[in-house]
């Protein structure tokens, strides 16, 4: 028995790793890989590496795994990949470039071993194969070396598993790689990790796929990064992102970015969210979009924000649904020059009590034919 133990202990030292064949490798006892060195593994002929067994790789620790080359990893069978541990991946580094579809067979728990170097060395093909079970096991710090092209390689199943901490770790510039189809599968919670700097890098195609729960999950501060062009891509409809825009989101959105809003987006923004409107924001809204304000939305806009209305904006109000939402405080806040835009049709729908907010300077800017729209109840309050 003693002789057998001694023989087993000395196998690793006796092996000429540089001349191994596939058959030789298959026959090395798994226990011998507990003492194998990086130099040993690095010297194994590439073609022989298809002989690795799962039980052998399971015993390879971080330091010896650092000896592997990408070409050797590329030869591993899917069965062998099932023996790869987190410790193994922690030492592999750049050699992870050898993984392809074989990455599917690495146990999900082992993905916790990926380092920034290891993850960023994966090929687009390998990145696209990561599953929803494997993805969340990767430590967030490993994501901070991914390029935009690599982020763009994530498959839909992997996107399903991305966490908010991982999103927070991705470099802002790399957000340009996100594809809309990835967002379709991503959990709303994942959007908690998006910063303003990251949001600024998103393509309009990706933003257009953000739905209501995802938009609600975006930190309000992240809206500070959205440009007018990006806002123009906000999706509207029953599950479109516009329906998830909150009051705080509007407060954080740069005033100049409001020029990107389209009418239908305003139609779907929750009424209470209009409390986030400011004077500066209103002044940048396009006339073609302002008609998307409903009566209830108009009533939710803070009175002071109406100071941002211009004559181009007031000229758009022609129906009961928006003109009927003008209150006395709103009328009082609208600057005299903006009254030039009002049409008689709008005056017909403005509540009579609101006209008590019209000042002498305002009257000087109202067009004569607009006055004809006043109702009998309103006339005494403005003349």
Image: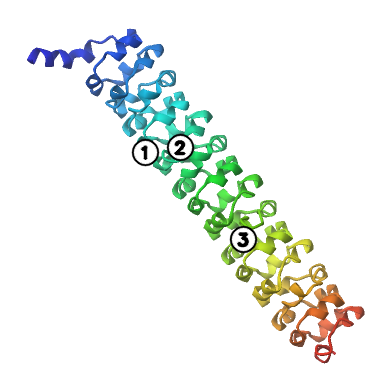
Q: Position of residue 192 (x, y in %)?
A: 49, 54
Q: Position of residue 296 (x, y in %)?
A: 67, 74
What numbered label is drawn on residue 302? none
**Inter-mark Cα distance, 3 to 2:** 30 Å
Identify whether 134 is placed above or below 282: above
Using the image as rendered, state which of residue 76 and residue 199 is in the foreground.
76
Q: What residue lies at 77% left-to-right and 80% top-to-bottom?
A: 350
**Inter-mark Cα distance, 1 to 2:** 14 Å
What numbered label is drawn on residue 112? 1
At mark 1, the secondary structure is helix
Give the mark nearest the N terminus, 3 or 1.
1
At mark 2, the secondary structure is loop
Q: Mark 2 and mark 3 in contact (Cβ < 8 Å)? A: no
14 with respect to 91 (left or right): left
Residue located beneath label 3 in the image? 243
Q: Which quadrant: the C terminus?
A: bottom right
Residue located beneath label 2 in the image? 131
């Amino acid at each position: 028995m003693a002789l057998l133990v001694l023989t087993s202990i000395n196998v690793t030292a006796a092996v000429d790793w540089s001349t191994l064949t596939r058959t030789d490798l298959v026959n090395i006892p798994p226990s011998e890989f507990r003492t194998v060195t990086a130099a040993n593994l690095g010297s194994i002929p590439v073609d022989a590496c298809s002989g690795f067994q799962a039980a052998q790789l399971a015993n390879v620790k971080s330091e010896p795994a650092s000896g592997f080359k990408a070409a050797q990893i590329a030869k591993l069978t899917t069965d062998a990949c099932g023996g790869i541990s987190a410790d193994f991946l922690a030492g592999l580094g750049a050699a992870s470039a050898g993984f392809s579809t074989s990455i599917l067979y690495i146990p999900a728990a082992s993905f916790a071993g990926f380092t920034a170097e290891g993850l960023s060395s994966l090929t687009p093909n390998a990145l696209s194969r990561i599953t929803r079970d494997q993805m969340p096991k990767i430590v967030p710090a490993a994501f901070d070396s991914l390029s935009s092209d690599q982020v763009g390689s994530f498959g839909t199943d992997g996107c399903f598993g991305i966490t908010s901490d991982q999103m927070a770790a991705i470099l802002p510039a790399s957000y340009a790689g996100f594809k809309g189809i990835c967002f379709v599968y991503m959990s709303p919670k994942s959007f908690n990790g998006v910063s303003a700097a990251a949001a600024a890098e998103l393509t309009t195609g990706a933003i257009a796929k953000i739905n209501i729960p995802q938009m609600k999950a975006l930190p309000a501060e992240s809206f500070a990064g959205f440009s007018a062009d990006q806002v123009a891509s906000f999706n509207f409809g029953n599950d479109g992102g516009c329906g998830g825009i909150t009051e705080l989101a509007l407060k954080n959105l740069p005033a100049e970015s409001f020029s990107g809003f389209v009418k239908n987006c305003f139609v779907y923004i929750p009424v209470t969210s209009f409390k986030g409107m400011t004077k500066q924001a209103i002044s940048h809204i396009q006339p073609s979009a302002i008609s998307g304000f409903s009566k209830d939305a108009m009533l939710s806009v803070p009175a002071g924000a109406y100071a941002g209305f211009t004559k181009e904006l007031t000229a758009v109000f022609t129906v009961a649904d928006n003109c009927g939402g003008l209150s006395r405080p709103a009328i009082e806040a609208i600057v005299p020059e903006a009254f030039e835009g009002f049409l008689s049709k709008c005056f017909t729908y403005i509540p009579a009590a609101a006209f008590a907010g019209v000042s002498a300077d305002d009257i000087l800017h109202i067009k004569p034919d607009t006055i004809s729209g006043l109702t009998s109840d309103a006339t005494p309050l403005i003349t």
